[in-house]
Image: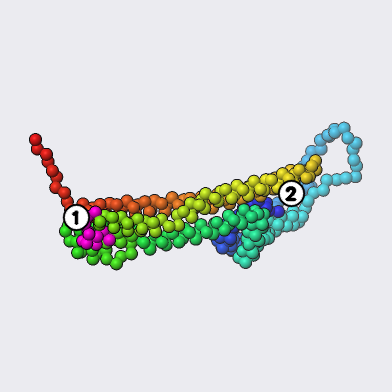
Amino acid sequence: MRNPSIRNLLAIGFLITSPFTAFAQAVDDTADQTQLVQAPSTVPDLAVPKVDDLAIPSVPVTTGLPETSGTEPQVETEGQIDVAAQSKSEQDLQFPTGPQTLEEQVTQAKDDAVEFLVDGGPSIWAIGALSVITVALILWKIWRLACIGAWSKNRAIYAVTLYERGDAAAARTHVMRRTGIRSKVIHVALEALMKHPEATAREETARVAKRELSRANSGLRALELIATIAPLLGLLGTVMGMIAAFQALQEAGSRADPAILAGGIWEALLTTAAGMAVAIPASAALTWFESVTERIRQDLEDNVTRLFVSAQPQPLKVAAE
């Protein structure tokens, strides 16, 4: 009989790994059947000497027990040994019974997942919903960062280099109508430098840069909230399960079964494990996204500073006494 704790703990993971498990099981069954076909079907005869040919000296043994008469030791013949060896080999070659098809494994995994959710209570349902939201947020955020060009910065750097060389028109053309966040800010800065004074151009560039950075940081607060409340929900489910387990123990009185108490405790601890399983990926993804947006901010500051320094270079003033 399978341990219900292991069955409930691995139910959701089994839904993902069941196709690979079925494929590996099919490969193992094929290999075992091939070995059976190639193996010899006969068992070698065991050379057992006959009792008459054995010269056993008679030695009197005193055991202190009454002697029995009329019984002789039974000796297995060669045919009996062959039959016993053949039956033992047939027992060793029997295959274990169990779900072998993919449909049966998927059905079993679904049943285990439903049982896992039912045993976990309301907290496990909330954690399951948070897990779906976390995966959706991570995938959406990666797609969003790719759309705004979070990992492409060569075009903006090349435009700044052209402006530093004195070719402002080529720099503007190079970043015109680009969707990358760095190219957008550089294009706004170039337009502002051509139309407004330096102070006004700085203000306009800062306004657009803050707006684009705010869009790049969208969705991070939700991940931060999930990483915070998922372990708390798991802890809440654990506390509620422990309370129910000890209430059942109190009602049982002196006839309390420790197995019932242990079963309630491990079912309650499953919610804590599920909450941590959701919070850890959310926290890791949040840290990664924050590092990406911080890198974007540093690149924007560096490129814009280079533009304004190149626009109006200030000569060095040496004070001579």
Q: Amino acid at mark 2?
A: Pro
Disc 2 packing (10 Å; few <14; some 14–19; many ≥20): few
Which is the main secondary structure of the residues drawn in magenta? helix
Residue 209: % across, % down = 32, 56
Disc nearer the start of the sequence (1/2) = 2
In the image, 49 versus 135, the foreground residue is: 135
Please identify, in this view, whether the residue under mark 1 or under mark 2 is nearer the observer: 1
Distance between mark 1 and mark 2 Cα atoms: 109 Å
- Residue denoted by label 1: 311
Magenta span contains residue 262: no
Magenta span contains residue 190: yes
Q: Is residue 230 visible?
A: yes
Q: Residue at x 62, y 66 (%)?
A: 103
Q: Which residues are magenta?
A: 188-199
Residue 97: % across, % down = 68, 60
Residue 17: % across, % down = 56, 59
- Residue denoted by label 2: 49
Disc 1 packing (10 Å; few <14; some 14–19; many ≥20): some
